[in-house]
Image (cartoon, rainbow, N blue to C red):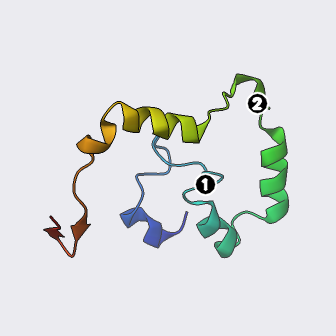
Amino acid sequence: MKAKDSIYFVPADSPVLPSKYDVRVRLRYLTRGEITLQELKKHKESLPDDTNFAEQRDYEALVTDQISEGAAAEVPPPVTNGSIVH
C-alpha cells in the first residue's frame, strides 16, 4: 500500500482492509501494477463454483406480481436536481 492510500484505508493489518481482488478496488490495483491480469485470472479460477446454490428468477413475473399487489403505488416520486418532481 502506498503512503497516499492511508487517507482512504485503515491500517494494513486491519481486517477491514479490502482484498486486492475485491471488485470495488481491483481496477485501481491493476492500473497501478500491484496485480496482473494473470494473477486475477488465477484468483478467479481458484474460486469455488457455487452455481448449484443459485436460484434463477423470472424478473418479468416478479415485477408483474409486485405491480398487481400494489407495490407500484409505494414507489417514491423521482428527484431531479435536489427537488422532488410531483
**Residue kind at label 1, given as amino acid type:** Val
Q: Residue at x 68, y 28 (%)?
A: 54
**Residue kind at label 2, given as amino acid type:** Thr
Residue 39's place in the image compared with 65, above or below, is below
Q: Please tell me whether mark 2 or mark 1 is closer to you in this view.
A: 2
Q: Earlier in the sequence, mark 2 or mark 1?
A: 1
Q: Nearer the viewer, residue 71 or 42?
A: 71
Residue at which label 1 appears: 23
Residue furthest toward the front? Answer: 68
Question: What separation in Å lies between label 2 and label 1 (alpha carbons)?
Answer: 19 Å
Q: Position of residue 50 (x, y in %)?
A: 74, 29
Q: Position of residue 18 (x, y in %)?
A: 53, 49
Q: Residue at x 73, y 63 (%)?
A: 35
**Where does the C terminus fall, quadrant-wise?**
bottom left
Is 24 displayed left or right of 16 in the figure? right
Q: Residues within 10 Å of mark 1 (few under 14, many from 20)?
A: few
Q: Position of residue 36 (x, y in %)?
A: 78, 65
Instruction: Say which quarter of the image contains residue 9.
Output: bottom left
Circle 1 — which element?
loop
Q: Residue at x 66, y 74 (%)?
A: 31
- Give the label on residue 42, or none: none
Instruction: Say which quarter of the image contains residue 38.
Output: bottom right
Residue 61's place in the image compared with 11, above or below, is above
Q: Nearer the viewer, residue 22 or 74?
A: 74
Circle 2 — which element?
helix
Residue at which label 2 appears: 51
Q: Residue at x 25, y 62 (%)?
A: 78
Total marks placed: 2
